[in-house]
Image (spheres, rainbow, N blue to C red):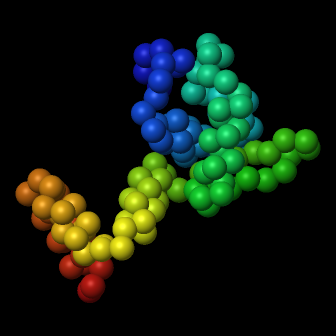
Amino acid sequence: MTGNPAARRAPGELAAEVLRVLGGAGSALTPAEVRDALDPTGALSYSAVVTTLTRLHSKKLVNRRRDGRAYRYSASADPAALTAWRMGRLLDAESDRASVLMRFVSTLSEHDEALLRDMLRDHDA
């Protein structure tokens, strides 16, 4: 993280940072190791990291295994999967999915719309 570690993060920013740390680690990490990688100054609370890891585990975005009295965590997904999970959750909350998707597509740049069309075409193939 850049800047002040104690500064207010945008929603989901800590989760994405945790996934990046776990994805770049060569092995599973404890919550303390994740916290130290995110903020060597110690300003980030241990409980915030544990809560984030627990939530990511419930979303199946990280794996965890017992190591003595603690858990070690490893990434089973990348930050893009977290964003996709959030998008799916928002879409699931709407009864008129077609309207939501249409409005979403209408806000895309030409480049992103072309990218989406290419991905959909490749998915159908």
Residue 58's quadrant in the figure? Answer: bottom right
At horizontal 43% and vertical 21% (from top left) the residue drawn is: 2
Which quarter of the figure is the C terminus placed in?
Answer: bottom left
Q: Residue furthest left?
A: 110
Residue 22's quadrant in the figure? Answer: top right
Residue 2 shown left or right of residue 67 in the figure: left
At horizontal 21% and vertical 61% (from top left) the residue drawn is: 104
Q: Residue furthest right?
A: 68
**Would residue 15 be visible to someone looking at this image?**
yes
Q: x and y percent of residue 35 in the render? A: 65, 28
Q: x and y percent of residue 52 in the render? A: 62, 41
Q: Is residue 84 above or below residue 51?
A: below
Residue 7 shown left or right of residue 116 in the figure: right
Q: Nearer the viewer, residue 25 or 94?
A: 94
At horizontal 62% and vertical 22% (from top left) the residue drawn is: 44
Residue 30 shown left or right of residue 66 in the figure: left
Q: x and y percent of residue 80 in the render? A: 41, 53
Residue 69's quadrant in the figure? Answer: top right
At horizontal 44% and vertical 56% (from top left) the residue drawn is: 86
Q: How many marks?
A: 0
Q: x and y percent of residue 70 in the render? A: 84, 41
Q: Residue furthest bottom?
A: 125
Residue 28 shown left or right of residue 106 in the figure: right
Q: Is residue 39 above or below residue 122?
A: above
**Would residue 115 be visible to someone looking at this image?**
no
Q: Is residue 93 above or below residue 79?
A: below
